[in-house]
Image: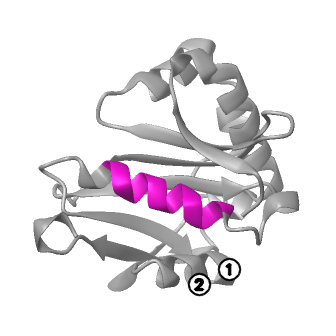
Amino acid sequence: MARVRIEAIGPEDWERYRTIRLEALRTDPDAFGSTFEREATRPEHDWRKRLEASDARTFVAIEAADSSFVGLVTCAPYAGHPRHIGLFSMWVTPAMRGRGIGGALVRELIAWARTLPEIDGVVLEVADENLAAVKLYESMGFRPNGVRGSLPPPRDHVLEHQRVHTFAPGGA
């Protein structure tokens, strides 16, 4: 992996989080349920609130050379899966892809989720055609659960499916 460290961030990091989140939405719009236009208009309060929720965490990959954020992933409660945490907003800057950063972000998210006694797995949605992400999630033990759907308009042409990673009994 490139010289990158993974850290959880809080509300004091809202501006840097906003910057990378908007970059992700602008660069890969078909990978997310939200849109650049919707997120770009959110006030500071909304960005801070996202990062201070006690039942959620956002992890970022930070490039050692210049401390820039080069990847992110968020986990939060997932409607319809009360014993699973949802993996959302996974993204790595194009220049840093293929270096193990995505895997490091997901491993950190899973490690945090395992500390929650009421949680026994992680669930996510991934676009069927996002083969790099599908391959990453498959390699980390995420398996399709048969639930299929699409992104909300205006990208309802993007078909996706759910994948679940269930923790082994005893937290292993």
Kind of element beneath mark 2: helix
The answer to which of 80 and 134 lies nearer the viewer is: 134
Q: Which residue is mark 2?
A: 135
Instruction: Quote the CA–CA distance across marks 2 and 1.
Output: 5 Å
Look at 37% across and 84% down and name the residue there. Answer: 143
The answer to which of 142 and 126 lies nearer the viewer is: 142
Q: Is residue 33 above or below residue 137?
A: above
Q: Which residue is mark 1?
A: 132
In x, y percent, where is residue 77?
29, 47
Q: Amino acid at mark 2?
A: Lys
Lateral position of residue 155 relative to residue 151, left or right:
right
Task: Tell me if label 2 and label 1 are in contact, CB under 8 Å.
Answer: yes
Look at 19% across and 62% down and name the residue there. Answer: 120
Look at 36% across and 38% down and name the residue there. Answer: 56
In x, y percent, where is residue 11?
52, 19
Does residue 65 belong to the magenta stretch?
no
